[in-house]
Image: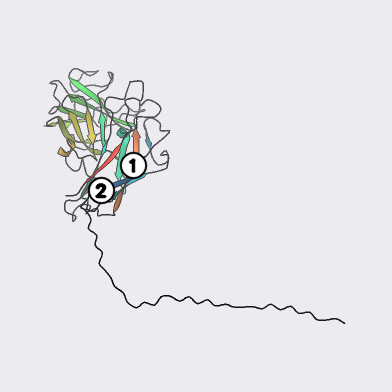
């Protein structure tokens, strides 16, 4: 006889009740925090490095080791920031025709642009020195070819593959109020550019012309240890400043410190600028940030390998 075998599963539900403490009363107390008045800023990323750059070329995000293309400046203090600007390191002597990278400084390659369209990249405070060798194809303002190196100091403003020749009258040994000349057309690896300075027209800040004999001239304004002038070079506005002893020539745009503060705001400007919060860029308030696009413009004739490390410094104030 077959017996039916049944298996049953018993389900049990157990309810666990949690009893919370009963609130019988409450009380509160005030909490106050007072912050110090502090102007502070943070810049990121903390370092940048470009590799594999060819001479006379531009280093951008594809050649930066972490593909960075911008820097971000953040107000981490407690005060509204009114002005932001930059300083960049530069070589203390000419890095050309020396047979090593010892005199180079990567800070001298840095160009910055505001985060707007179209982008306009300018050097912070590029420095140039006189030519280490005679350039036999240049004609000086007196018509001498090669130039009279006793009367004139001459060199180049190097902007990646474009080089603009310039002359400076140094005859009296004090270059704070002497005559400065700049070529209009760039010298490149395939084009000679403006090389005849015997018939320059007045107006360093005027729009550049074109041609082998196209150049402009003006007189530097003296201010203690430097002579300065606004200058349009290659279609870009800079403040040109020459040291008293004629041994160093700056081209500044993002550095309005002395001696560049003497030039107009169109040639040397703050990256962030307001006088009272209601004009210009307005206040950069605590916790707010803004970006600047960054590249490097490496000139021709720089020795191979790693250039000496440079620094980009951001400066701020609250007025």
Residue 264 falls in image quadrant: top left
Within 10 Å of disc 1 (Cα), the crowding (few <14, some 14-19, many 20+) is: many
Q: What residue is drawn where x is 32% and y is 30%?
A: 105
Q: Position of residue 86 (x, y in %)?
A: 25, 41
Residue positioned most to the right: 1
**Mark 1 = which residue?**
294
Q: Nearer the viewer, mark 2 or mark 1?
A: 2
Determine if residue 226 is in view. yes
| Vertical position of residue 66 compared to residue 127: above or below | below
- Comparing 132 with 196, the one in front is 132
| Vertical position of residue 58 compared to residue 96: above or below | below
Determine if residue 208 is in view. no
Q: Position of residue 72 (x, y in %)?
A: 32, 47
Q: What residue is drawn where x is 23% and y is 34%?
A: 251
Q: Position of residue 274 (x, y in %)?
A: 19, 51
Say left or right for 186 vs 61.
Answer: left
**Mark 2 = which residue?**
40
Q: Label 2's element?
A: loop
Q: What residue is drawn where x is 80% and y is 81%?
A: 4
Q: Label 1's element?
A: strand
Q: Position of residue 35 (x, y in %)?
A: 23, 55
Q: What residue is drawn where x is 39% and y is 77%?
A: 22
- Comparing 262 with 32, the one in front is 32
Say left or right for 71 vs 215.
Answer: right
């Amino acid at each position: 006889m077959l017996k039916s075998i049944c298996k049953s599963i018993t389900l049990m539900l157990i309810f666990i009740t949690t009893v919370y403490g009963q609130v019988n009363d409450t009380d509160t107390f005030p909490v106050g925090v007072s912050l110090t008045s502090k102007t502070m800023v943070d810049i990121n990323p903390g370092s940048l490095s470009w590799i594999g750059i060819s001479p006379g070329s531009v280093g951008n995000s594809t050649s930066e080791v972490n593909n960075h293309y911008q820097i971000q400046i953040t107000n981490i203090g407690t005060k509204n920031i009114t002005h932001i600007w930059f300083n960049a390191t530069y070589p203390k002597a000419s890095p050309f025709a020396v047979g090593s990278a010892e005199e180079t400084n990567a800070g001298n390659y840095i160009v910055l642009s505001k985060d707007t369209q179209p982008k306009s990249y300018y050097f912070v405070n590029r420095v140039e020195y006189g030519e280490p060798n005679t350039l036999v194809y240049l004609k000086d303002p007196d018509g001498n070819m090669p130039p009279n190196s006793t009367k004139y100091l001459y060199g180049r403003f190097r902007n990646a593959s474009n080089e603009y020749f310039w002359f400076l009258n140094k005859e009296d040994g004090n270059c704070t109020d002497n005559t400065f000349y700049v070529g209009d057309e760039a010298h490149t690896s395939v084009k000679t550019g403006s090389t005849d300075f015997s018939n320059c027209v007045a107006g360093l800040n005027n729009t550049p012309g074109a041609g082998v004999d196209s150049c402009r001239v003006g007189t530097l304004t003296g201010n203690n240890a430097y002579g300065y002038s606004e200058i349009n070079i290659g279609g870009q506005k800079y403040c040109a400043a020459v040291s008293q002893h004629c041994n160093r020539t700056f081209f500044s745009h993002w550095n309005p410190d002395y001696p560049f503060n003497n030039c107009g705001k169109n040639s040397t400007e703050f990256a962030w600028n307001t006088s009272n919060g209601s004009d210009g860029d307005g206040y950069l308030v605590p916790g707010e940030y803004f970006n600047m696009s960054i590249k490097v413009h490496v000139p021709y004739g720089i020795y191979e390998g790693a250039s000496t490390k440079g620094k980009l410094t951001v400066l701020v104030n609250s007025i």
